[in-house]
Amino acid sequence: MGLNDWLNEKVPEITSALNDINRQYVDIENSIGFVGRNQIYKILDNFHEVLFPGIHTAPPIDNTRINIISSNKLRETALDLRDIIEKVLIYNMEYSKSENCTCQEDADRIVMNLISQFPKIRKILQTDIQAAYTGDPAALSTEEILLSYPSIVAVYIHRIAHELYEMGVPIVPRIMSEYAHSLTGIDIHPGATIGESFFIDHGTGVVIGETCIIGNNVKIYQSVTLGALSFPLDENGNPIKGIKRHPNIEDNVVIYAGATILGGETTIGHDSVLGSNIWLMNSIPPYSRVYNSPPSPNISSSKSKNK
């Protein structure tokens, strides 16, 4: 049998078998997949343009046009987001077998509440930008940070996703956070609470867990993990959800590259400095300095002295 005959005769059998398997696990017709991740990505890109006009907005733009352009973009995007949130609320209602969802009204309320927070979010983001400029001697301007630093992308998406998470929106905040993860290599769960003036230097490999609480003026470096120490299990051996699993980081803390801080009962006291590659599973008081003993490398040369 040649390829063309095989494609015509066998591929329908294979796709039928795949669909039979999928129907065992997914309600294909009513799947949440209809929300579309790419549409959520576009919504975030539009919000980026509104939050930082002139930086990411296509020209021409000036002070005369700015309100019109931003208003139109925000109105259009608000309607798109409302439609998506309504769909996920309906899906969540059907999944949980609830009968008390006013999904359209709830979606309207959520979108209005979110966008009403944008001026506050923008002001907080400016503290993040300033923290990056102050904390990185390589930064030459805040515009450079805004245009090129992955930390700002990850944090702006997080601050939007966190608002939706706090309002109880299912699925959408997590899609947003994983979009930021794919763009920047920085993995921040939308449930994490993060204060002002937050800066992630370099950023690649950073993980911040769902129940982590971070104070103001905190700086962390690449490959830092703020994670769970263990997962308490229920009687069926499944992880118990909704409990505090990740550490608290108080104000004015610096955490250097490769550090791992674990546990929901772990608190890093304010004004502490945590050195590179430490492993910490217990609380420390304010003004602490935590570091490993310096390694003692053996250095030798393969070049003979007598050569």
Image (cartoon, rainbow, N blue to C red):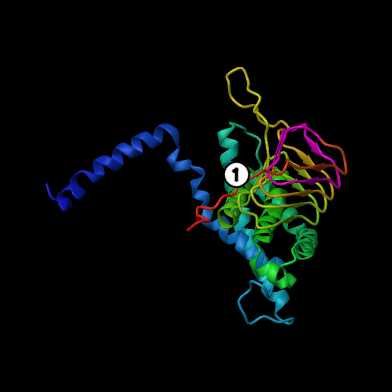
The image position of residue 187, as x and y in percent, is 62, 48
List the single residue furthest toward the left. Answer: 1
Q: Which amino acid type corresponds to the residue marked 1 in the rendered image?
A: Ile
Q: Looking at the image, is 160 positioned above or below residue 283? A: below
Q: Is residue 251 visible?
A: yes
Observer-nearest of 14 and 194: 194
Horizontal side of 40 relative to 28 (left or right) equals: right
Residue hosting label 1: 171
At horizontal 67% and vertical 46% (from top left) the residue drawn is 224
The image position of residue 104, as x and y in percent, is 64, 48
Observer-nearest of 249 and 44: 249
Q: Looking at the image, is 265 positioned above or below residue 212? A: above
At horizontal 73% and vertical 41% (from top left) the residue drawn is 293
Q: Quadrant of residue 287?
A: top right
Horizontal side of 87 relative to 9 (left or right) equals: right
Horizontal side of 205 relative to 193 (left or right) equals: left
Q: Quadrant of residue 140?
A: bottom right
At horizontal 56% and vertical 34% (from top left) the residue drawn is 95
In magenta, the rendered stretch is: 260-283
Q: Is residue 282 magenta?
A: yes
The image position of residue 93, as x and y in percent, is 60, 37
Q: Give the dominant element type of the magenta stretch: helix, strand or loop.
A: loop
Q: Residues within 10 Å of mark 1 (few under 14, many from 20)?
A: some
The image position of residue 297, as x and y in percent, is 63, 45
Observer-nearest of 75 and 59: 59
Observer-nearest of 220 and 183: 220
